[in-house]
Amino acid sequence: MDRQEKLKIRYKNLPQYKTLTEEQLDEVVKSKVEQEELADSFVGLNDDERKKALILYNRYLEENSFTNLAEKSSLITLISLELLKERMQILIKKESDQNQGAIPMRVVEQILEVETKIMELKKNLGMLKDKQDSSMADALDELYQKALKYYEENAGCTTARCPHCSKFFNLLMDVRNLEPAKATFFKGTMLYNHKLFELYDKKVISTEEMAEILNVSVKGIFYIHTNLYLKDKKC
């Protein structure tokens, strides 16, 4: 006995289906089995995402005339990518909240790739009108410009956290095309900023605040103040 026959026997005993004819009950059961099989085709989604995927699938079918198997298969892929993009956007917000607004560039780049594939699928399925094409292109360009702006402002941040083991690692950079600029927070190899220690010397900033700003111990602040700043001050 297949799934459809088992489901029909169970439905016959439910109050809401007792008034249906055999043909009507067959249609209800057939629709239910098709929805279950469709939900199973969305691999890698959780229960909530599968429910949303089914809603999107039925909505897209209503808005477009997809009839052949290839189109419906592409539609499943499209919806899976759209939900994957939403999942990555949630990840960006989570990491941004945890890291004081820093945007994980690797995820932004992945979103751009996924968005490109989504647009290609929609175009192949005839879902994009001229106005929609322009709107989507503008949205993609805006996302790209935001990512580029963040990269330009944070290109020197080469420490990243592994999404698998959560350990930090450094990203090696090719510096041949970079322009040199004075390192205002170093003197030789020592972490140091004269203006900052000038404020500290005038008691504008406490020792604890200095230690927090430079991410060193209180003893480290005493050492730098005595061995660098006071010597600079005498010069």
Image: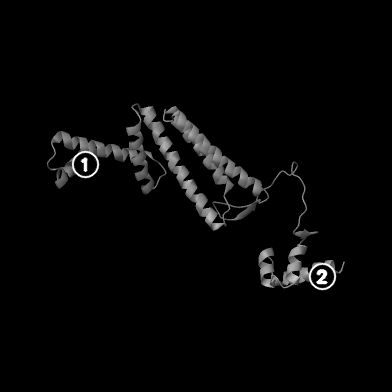
For the point 58% across and 44% down, which residue is it? 146
**Residue type for callout 1:** Leu
Pointer 1 local density, CA inside 10 Å: few below 14, some 14–19, many at least 20: some
For the point 50% across and 38% down, which residue is it? 115
Give x and y (percent) for residue 125: 42, 28
Q: Quadrant of residue 195?
A: bottom right
Give x and y (percent) for residue 84: 46, 43
Relative to residue 116, is residue 52 depicted above or below?
below
Asked if the residue at tag 1 contacts the one at tag 2, i.e. Cβ–Cβ closer than 8 Å, the answer is: no
Relative to residue 224, is residue 120 depicted above or below?
above
Pointer 2 local density, CA inside 10 Å: few below 14, some 14–19, many at least 20: some
Q: Is residue 162 left or right of residue 198?
A: left
Q: Nearer the viewer, mark 2 or mark 1?
A: 2
Say the numbered circle drawn on residue 230.
2
Question: Between disc 2 and disc 1, whose residue precedes?
Answer: 1
Q: Is residue 56 left or right of residue 191?
A: left
Give x and y (percent) for residue 1: 21, 38
Say the numbered circle drawn on residue 96.
none
Q: Residue furthest top?
A: 68
Secondary structure category for the residue under label 1: helix
Secondary structure category for the residue under label 2: helix
Q: Is residue 5 left or right of residue 228?
A: left
**Residue type for callout 2:** Leu
Q: How is the image coloured?
A: one colour
Give x and y (percent) for residue 229: 80, 67
- Circle 1 is placed at which residue position? 7
Looking at the rendering, in which quadrant would you find the C terminus? bottom right
